[in-house]
Amino acid sequence: MADNIQTTNGSDEKNGKVSLEVLAKMTGFPVEVIKDEIFRGEASDQISLESLRTAMLSYIDSTMLINDQK
């Protein structure tokens, strides 16, 4: 498991949390862009991996649907 992911029980990645600052550094996107675009302004500084997965899938789906309608 990555060193920058904190888990609540030490072994279950679904219960892990990642900070938006670390995510921003890993992806190269500013924290505010991640909050506004991926989480639509509703993210805290620490997010669960499950919430991240859900938000990313939603963002990808909405982006692909917008591009398909052109």
Image: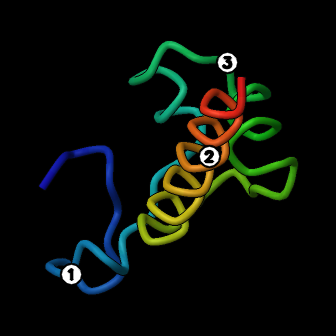
Answer whether labels 3 and 2 touch (C-beta < 8 Å).
Answer: no
Q: Is residue 4 above or below residue 7?
A: above
Q: How would you rate the neighbour count of disc 2 (Cα within 10 Å): few for under 14, some for 14-19, many for 20 or more? A: some
Q: Is residue 66 above or below residue 6?
A: above
Left or right of 47 in this view: 44: right
Work out which quarter of the rendered image holds the N terminus and state it: bottom left
Closer to the chain start, of discs 3 and 2, is 3
Q: How would you rate the neighbour count of disc 1 (Cα within 10 Å): few for under 14, some for 14-19, many for 20 or more? A: few
Residue sitting nearer the eye, 69 or 39: 69
Q: Residue furthest top?
A: 28
Left or right of 41 in this view: 17: left
Closer to the chain start, of discs 3 and 1, is 1
Q: How would you rate the neighbour count of disc 3 (Cα within 10 Å): few for under 14, some for 14-19, many for 20 or more? A: few
What residue do we see at 14% from left, 79% from top? 11
Which amino acid, mark 1? Answer: Asp
Which amino acid, mark 3? Answer: Pro
Q: Where is mark 2, residue-wise?
A: 59
